[in-house]
Amino acid sequence: MPVIVDPDSGSVRRLLGALPPGCQSVDSPDRLLPWLAQHSDEYVVVLGPNVRFDDAVTVCEGLRVSRPMTGVILVRESFDTQTLARAMQAGAREVVALNDLDSIAGAVTRAHQFSVALRGPAAAEHHGQVIAVFSPKGGVGKTTIAVNLALALTDKGNRQVCLVDFDLAFGDVAITLQLFPTHTIEHAIGSENNVDAALLDSLLARYQDSLKVLPAPSHPDVRERITPTLISQTLNTLRSMFDYIVVDSAPAFDEQTLTVLEDADETVIIATLDVPTLKNVKVALDTLEMLAIGRGHRHLLLNRADDAVGIDAQKVESILGMDISTQITTSIDIAASTNSGVPILTSTPHHPSSAAIRNLAAMFTGDPVSPSGAEPGRHADVDGERRSRFRIRR
Ligand SMILES: Nc1ncnc2c1ncn2[C@@H]1O[C@H](COP(=O)(O)OP(=O)(O)OP(=O)(O)O)[C@@H](O)[C@H]1O
Ligand SMILES: [Mg+2]
């Protein structure tokens, strides 16, 4: 997915609006190289208008030699023929004006086509979308949502989906699905620089034909040996194998979780209607904003969205400063489904929570949402325009 380089968040937002979902951003050319080191298949870098021209030229000259497969698009407020000539000599693929968003989108599409042509048709096969499920609080429903969202995304086997348990110390995806895996991400330790589809395929467990699962290690002390590089390489490789990769995460801001959030195309953030959780979600959102992680690609899910607890959905939106995309009420059926090891989406597909999760999945796939059977509240209001923002461009 394209990476934007620009120190100004307003310009980044403007560019994000023109580019495919899942674009990432870094705030300086200095941060670009470490970022690229973790994203070996990156096909295009978009240098925003606030990157100094001399710095932009240095980036172009460096990448032309070190990463000829990665195109550089230079965006300027305005430019003259001298700027254009200098940028092209340095190795920029295109120079585009900031107010010409269509041309920026076109330049990115051309960079993708060029990359596919260079890497061969296999590169175009999958360009999986990584969806992280995160909350800074434990026990709010991350695993429940991740498991059911992954199942909803499979669309009964029509899409290739992998569910990854990156709650590395206390992951419970496997037990939630009653899987007893022999292999986990632990078996990829030491292969950071050689992660490939064959290795990952050998670690995946299968749930009911339609879903593949990469389980968390079975012992908590393994967590510290799972490096950010291994996490990034794993997600990158899974992108080439699956249409969607849903990542369950730990209730923490450790370096592994931050890497997941940085690499994710979309993040579902879970809150519940209690003051400590809302306080922590607010701090987490502020931190993500400060680090420019997931801007424009965060979706708030309110779990246990029940009446009469003294805080309502509107108050949550005003505290957190963002709209709620999905609400799920407390239901004994959800708790029972966890205990029985059969996710609610499988055990009770017509349950309002199942419908809400299917609609959440539709937000990412661009499928039509079903107004009937949606949870009471806000979810069914996802309109066509909003859905199209999340549609994958292949
Ligand atoms: N809307 C709900 N109604 C009833 N029970 C729920 C609901 N959401 C989650 N639960 C239950 O709450 C428990 C905790 O959920 P879950 O394991 O998904 O949380 P988590 O955020 O992943 O926790 P952890 O931080 O420990 O990983 C589970 O037993 C689950 O069934
Ligand atoms: Mg969990």
Image (spheres, rainbow, N blue to C red):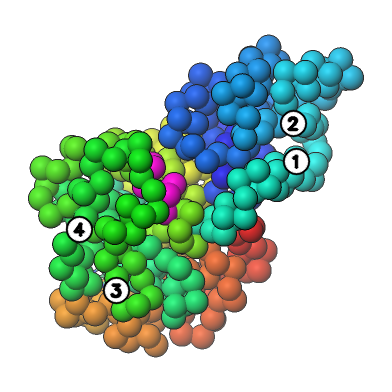
Labels 4 and 3: the sequence-earlier one:
4
Dot 4 corresponds to which residue? Answer: 183
**Label 3 neighbourhood size at 10 Å, few (<14), some (14-19), many (20+)?**
some
> On screen, 90 above or below 172?
above
**Number of the label disc, if any, that sits on residue 207:** 3
Alpha carbon distance from label 4 to label 3: 14 Å
Q: Nearer the viewer, mark 1 or mark 4?
A: 4
The answer to whether residue 236 is visible is yes
User: Is residue 130 located in the magenta-colored stretch of the structure?
Assistant: no
Along the viewing direction, whichever of 77 and 56 lies nearer the viewer: 56
Q: Amino acid at mark 4?
A: His
Alpha carbon distance from label 1 to label 4: 42 Å
Q: Are marks 2 and 1 in contact (CB under 8 Å)?
A: yes
Q: Is residue 226 left or right of residue 155?
A: left
Region in magenta: 232-238
Q: What percent of the width, then of the height, locates residue 83? A: 82, 17
Q: Nearer the viewer, mark 4 or mark 2?
A: 4
Could you tell me which secondary element the residue under label 2 belongs to?
Answer: loop
Labels 3 and 1: the sequence-earlier one:
1
**Number of the label disc, if any, that sits on residue 107:** 1
